[in-house]
Image: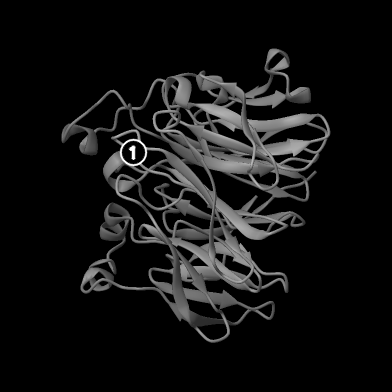
């Protein structure tokens, strides 16, 4: 079951705080919905002149990507991925300061992962990387300082997709996109060691994954081959097992009380190039339907479909892929909160999805 939240259209859920409050964004505004149902604006992000007014149009904001990409709570504040940078927001004072700026050839980090230890969160370089530069992984220290953690050599990977904490300690790191650049790596807790686990195949191209007692569960993110939810047991690529087929690539996911919820994306054919690619509505070979599919992987490693939502009629590359993106910090929730993008009758709508065991 899916229900619209009692928030304005365009309110994008970002993160649940330790006290149960929900942080959401509306353009450059960072807001907090308290547990009593009242919400207030707590901070304002940097706003290039004129763009905020232009992006009062939903279509313009979609085309210009005028929204926070993702966020996590760090040491009582909020770390926000916004317009090619990471910003730390103090939700009490409204103070906003830059922690990290994307290097030339890269853009806004795709994901931020909460961390325990010497840093409060980690992320990696993400973007087109046309010159095949070295790709870094970074963290934010508890004093708010930037910590470069490690670096993939030039040409090894295109960019970093995401991270999954390992039950045994350390990290799984997901990289993209094509050929040898797609892979899953195992990293130590401080990233002093990063070793390939399963690389060089679209079966190992992922953004979201979760370590379980049975092994690493992840959904593939490929528009060029058929996608699946996989189980990688005992860190043995030879034992890789398909848990379920999906109707398309997966960028977004979240842990929840019932297990792990994945959302597929409706993406265009990457083989269409040039100006025409921005107006094309042709699906990629790995995108089977014009629907976003939500799949639950239960704590028993069983997979079931929760629902499907139809993509709207606008072209995907210009006006964004059809998807549901989830707020962070939902590990103990049965009602999962997300943001619908480019979906018929639900675009820019914050929703709550009831996910039963």
Identify whether 247 is placed above or below 89.
above
Residue 305, horizontal then vertical, whole percent: 65, 34
Residue 38 left/right relative to 126: right
Q: What percent of the width, then of the height, locates residue 176? A: 46, 32
Q: Which image quadrant is residue 54 in?
A: bottom left
Image coords of residue 126 (percent x, y): 42, 44
**Residue 149 showing in the rendered view:** yes
Which one is in front, 321 or 209? 209
Task: Determine the residue located farthest toward the bottom in the rendered image.
Answer: 93
Q: Is residue 184 left or right of residue 104?
A: right
Number of marks? 1
Q: Residue furthest front?
A: 192
Looking at the image, the residue that sits furthest to the top is 238
Residue at left 26%, top 71%?
A: 48
Residue drawn at 43 percent across, 66 percent down: 9
Instruction: Give the quadrant of the C terminus.
Output: top right
Viewer can see residue 315: no
Q: Position of residue 178 (x, y in %)?
A: 42, 24
Dot 1, how many residues are within 10 Å of its Cα: few (below 14), some (14-19), or many (20+)?
some
Where is 73 relative to 208, above or below?
A: below
Residue positioned 62% across, 70% down in the render: 22
> On the image, numbered disc 1 is attached to which residue?
129
Q: Secondary structure at mark 1?
A: loop
Horizontal side of residue 138 vs 304, given as left or right: left
Which of the pair 321/204 is nearer the observer? 204
């Amino acid at each position: 079951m899916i229900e619209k939240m009692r928030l304005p259209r365009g309110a994008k859920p970002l993160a649940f705080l330790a006290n149960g409050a929900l942080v959401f964004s509306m353009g450059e505004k960072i807001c907090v919905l308290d547990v009593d149902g009242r919400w207030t604006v707590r901070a304002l992000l940097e706003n290039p002149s004129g763009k905020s007014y232009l992006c009062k149009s939903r279509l313009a904001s979609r085309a210009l990507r005028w929204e926070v990409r993702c966020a996590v709570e760090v040491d009582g504040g909020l770390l926000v991925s916004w317009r090619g940078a990471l910003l730390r927001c103090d939700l009490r004072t409204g103070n906003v300061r830059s922690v990290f700026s994307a290097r030339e050839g890269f853009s806004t980090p795709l994901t931020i992962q909460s961390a325990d230890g010497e840093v409060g969160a980690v992320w990696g370089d993400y973007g087109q990387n046309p010159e095949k530069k070295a790709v870094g992984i970074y963290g934010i220290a508890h004093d708010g300082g930037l910590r470069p953690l490690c670096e993939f050599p030039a040409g090894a990977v295109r960019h970093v997709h995401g991270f999954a904490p390992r039950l045994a300690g350390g990290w799984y790191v997901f990289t993209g996109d094509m050929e040898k650049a797609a892979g899953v790596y195992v990293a130590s807790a401080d990233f002093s060691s990063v070793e390939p686990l399963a690389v060089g195949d679209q079966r190992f191209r992922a953004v979201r994954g979760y370590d379980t007692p049975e092994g690493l569960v992840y959904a593939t993110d490929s528009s060029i081959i058929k996608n699946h939810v996989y189980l990688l047991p005992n860190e043995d690529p030879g034992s890789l097992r398909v848990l379920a087929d999906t109707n398309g690539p997966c960028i977004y996911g979240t842990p929840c009380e019932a297990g792990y919820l994945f959302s597929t994306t409706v993406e265009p054919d990457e083989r269409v190039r040039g100006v025409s690619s921005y107006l094309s509505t042709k699906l990629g070979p790995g995108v089977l339907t014009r629907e976003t599919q939500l799949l639950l992987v239960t704590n028993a490693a069983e997979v079931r479909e929760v629902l499907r939502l139809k993509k709207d009629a606008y072209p995907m590359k210009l006006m964004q892929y059809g998807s549901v993106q989830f707020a962070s910090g939902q590990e103990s929730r049965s009602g999962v909160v997300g943001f619908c993008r480019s979906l018929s009758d639900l675009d820019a709508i914050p929703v709550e999805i009831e996910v039963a065991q």
